[in-house]
Image: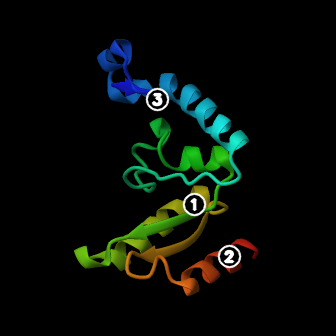
Amino acid sequence: MVLFGQVNPELTAMAWRERSAHVWPRAAAALDALRAENDVVVIEGAGSPAEINLADSDYVNMRVARHAGARCLLVTDIDRGGAFAHLYGTGRCCRRKTAPCCTASSSTSSVATPACWRRARSSSSA
């Protein structure tokens, strides 16, 4: 396990679900430092925020977003198929716990369009 560019033998030896309690405080402190130094911090999650079986040990998705008070944009790749089902299913699963965070969804073909960003801004002010 590499943490802040250094191999950490103790974390490497731990079961991966046990690592969260040890990694999260350091990740949160790093995020807080970045936010203190910058006007904008872009955070990219890993995997799916709808993995309810991983929610208790998650420190790479919604836990980070909640800690930062961040608005989230869920993005999927329309060229791989199942994009709309992915957006709908993830949105339905996430809204139960994370409704204040999730403001917009998009496929990669329209993520950069002005219409998508207008929808995100208008839904966040509602």
Disc 1 residue type (three-letter) = Arg
The residue positioned farthest toward the right in the image shown? 125
User: Residue beneath label 1, please?
Assistant: 96
User: Residue beneath label 3, please?
Assistant: 20
- Could you say which is closer to the camera, residue 85 or residue 122? 122
User: Residue beneath label 2, please?
Assistant: 121
Say whether residue 93 is left or right of residue 114: left
Say whether residue 29 is left or right of residue 57: right
**What residue is shown at x 30% (from left), y 15% (from top)?**
13
Q: Are marks 1 and 3 in contact (CB under 8 Å)?
A: no
**What residue is shown at x 63% (from left), y 30% (from top)?**
29
Q: Quadrant of residue 84?
A: bottom left
Could you say where residue 14 lies in the image, as x and y percent from the top left? Answer: 34, 18
Q: Quadrant of residue 28?
A: top right
1 or 2: tag closer to the N-terminus = 1
Disc 3 residue type (three-letter) = Ser
> In the rendered image, which quarter contains the N terminus?
top left
Q: Secondary structure at mark 1?
A: helix
1 or 3: tag closer to the N-terminus = 3
- Could you give the CA–CA distance between mark 1 and mark 3, rounded to whole angstroms? 23 Å
> In the rendered image, which quarter contains the C terminus?
bottom right
Mark nearest the camera among 1 and 3 is 3
Is 41 located above or below residue 15 in the figure? below
Q: Secondary structure at mark 3?
A: helix
**What residue is shown at x 51% (from left), y 83% (from top)?**
113
Circle 1 packing at 10 Å, graded few (<14), some (14-19), many (20+), is few
- Could you say which is closer to the camera, residue 96 or residue 91? 91
Circle 2 packing at 10 Å, graded few (<14), some (14-19), many (20+), is some
Is 109 located above or below residue 26 in the figure? below
Q: Secondary structure at mark 2?
A: helix
- Could you give the CA–CA distance between mark 3 and mark 2, rounded to whole angstroms? 32 Å
